[in-house]
Amino acid sequence: MGFWRRLISHPGAVVGLVVILLYVFAALLAPWIAPYGPREMVLADRLKPPAFLEGGSRSHLLGTDQLGQDIFSRILYGARVSLLVGLTSVSISLTVGTVLGCIAGYWRGWVDRILSRVADLLMGFPYLLFTIFAMAIIGPGFGNLIIALCFKAWVEFFRLARGEMLAEGTKEYVEAARALGRGPVAIIAGEVLPNIVHSLLVLATLRMGYMIIMEASLSFLGLGIPPSIPAWGSMVNAGRDQMLNAWWVATMPGLAIVGLVLAINMFGEGLRDVLDPRMRR
Amino acid sequence: MKAVRILERVLTALPMSLLMLLLVFGFVRLLPGDPVDIMMGQSGNVSQAEIDALRRELHLDRPLPEQLAIFLRGLLRGDLGTSFREQRPVAEVIGDAFPATVELALAALLVALLIGLPIGVLSAVRRNSWFDRLAMGVSFLGISMPAFWLGIMAIMLFSVHLGWTPVQGRLSAGIAPPDLTGLYVLDGLLTRDWALLKDALLHLLLPAVTLGAELTAIIARVTRSSMLEALQMDYVTAARARGVPEWQVVLRHALRNALIPTVTVAGLQLGVLLGGNMIVETVFGWPGLGRLVVGAIFGRDYALVQGAVMLYALTFLIANLLVDILYTQLNPKLEL
């Protein structure tokens, strides 16, 4: 059976993919579907409950926050931040880690020793602490946040790519390619990479949910996305002060995070079952 | 023989920790903003002479290699320098905050093992039953949920709404902990101070469950899959054939082997629990190292950041080391 056939017959992967696509559409179409602007404040409508509660109205589906901003609209715009940060940071980490991992695994020797020591060293620091530290050094901002998230995240891709490269490097087809006089780049990119790309993609998908949680955590601490851009993490943080009288302010954006990360993880596990049967339990 | 190998493993960890130390020292100096300016900025108008004096006192007027030498010499004497902001020795500041972090991390680990292990075993034994499906579904939710949000939800439900647990901190006002281990639950047990014990446990409950939630899910999943594998092994079939009762087959034969991956994950995660707790400490107002270090990074409190991050890295290293050692204990065929 082909890859797509198998993927479509995996219920978890399908559900995950559909939900992810919903989030992507919500993010892309936010200016058209959102009933309000992301920073549109109506002070008269402060802390209105969601439509399904008493006192709520259809005009604010998920209620409003302490500034009278529509929570539903802000969640739609917030999806842009989460998806963009998740996608870019994983792509960068995947690329950097794979390139370095292939180099270390192919040439071994001192290149491998140095890169592996750097990787070991970085693994010695807790991820969140390291990222906070990096943010403090390079300063706040959207791009800097992504850089800070990647500082350590490439290591996992590096280790996977290196290990696979080491294992593949001794196989006959690589020896054959070498004997035919093909250069290292051609061997790595043309021969080995197609064989190891599956496990790298599975890892990338599973890491994306984690990156989204990381971004939300940093924004929650006030160290991530600048406050002018609506992000789910900072929305939850704003809701902390309203715990006593308006539970929905902190709850709704959190549900948005859980929904997206859950969908990504479901899709990732499905992808693993389909692409990487060795890992299947 | 085994002791020699363990010693070897410890010795190889030493250069690693030295490298980490250098890295932290360098990183801290990369932080933008001058610590003296930040400190002086808080106290209003000061003369240039005072600024220079402070710079000298903190050795910030020396070249970097000399600062490093001063720092390393201090480290050997157990002197981590003075925290700019707290005006106290760093070792003392960390010493006050660290027990809170350790208590929280250990409690979270305990929660994760007590809940995650039985769920994983039961899920494997009753594979594909409704229990298995439910448990794996919930555990999937557990790894997809941000801790800060889970913590806030828990506070809203159990503290604000139901009033069962306190909202913030480690102890209620008016309860004074004894000067013992700094782990208040343990202190309460040791001194048989039941009021202290109860208060400390109530404060610990929600943060521990919040911090341990993800690990609980991970442990349940890892245990389930390694149990499934173990239950298909020949020695399990052999034990069944000898007429060993099923519960003994599961617990004594299969679980012992299935525990290896679980222990590895739990040990590696202990480092994460200790180092990833800024979030949970912030949400629950827990006066630990995580909250302290975040404040110190942004206050440019060089000495405090250095000391705290080094402690983190060291705990991480030790946790990894312990995992390696435990690993060989559980599986004698393996060597370090």
Image: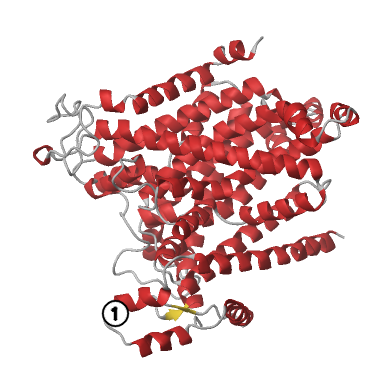
Q: Quadrant of residue B18?
A: bottom right
Q: Is residue B115 visible?
A: no
**Residue indicated by mark 1:** B43
Residue furthest out toward the left: A44
Tell me the amino acid under the disc marked 1: Ser
Please give left or right for residue A14 compared with residue A226 in the image: right
Q: Residue extending furthest right?
A: A179
Q: Nearer the viewer, residue B34 or B198?
A: B34
Residue B111, given in percent of the width and then of the height, sits at: 50, 47
Tell me what residue is drawn at x 27 percent, y 47 percent: A238
Which quarter of the image is occupied by the C terminus of chain A?
Answer: top right
Q: Position of residue A178 (x, y in %)?
A: 87, 32
Q: Residue at x 65, y 22 (%)?
A: A275
Q: Quadrant of the N terminus of chain A?
A: top right
Q: Chain of mark 1?
A: B
| Mark 1 Cα shell of 10 Å, populated few (<14), some (14-19), many (≥20) | few
Q: Position of residue B218 (x, y in %)?
A: 56, 39
The answer to whether residue B197 of the structure is visible from this angle is yes
Q: Write the residue at 43% across / 35% down.
A: A84
Judge from the rendering whether residue B227 lies leftward or rightward of residue A10; answer left or right: right
Q: Is residue B8 above or below residue A176?
A: below
Tell me the element at label 1: loop
Identify the residue at horizontal 14%, vertical 40% (top origin): A46
Give the image location of residue B80, x and y in percent: 54, 77
Image: A58 above or below A38: above
- Left or right of A77, for residue B91: right
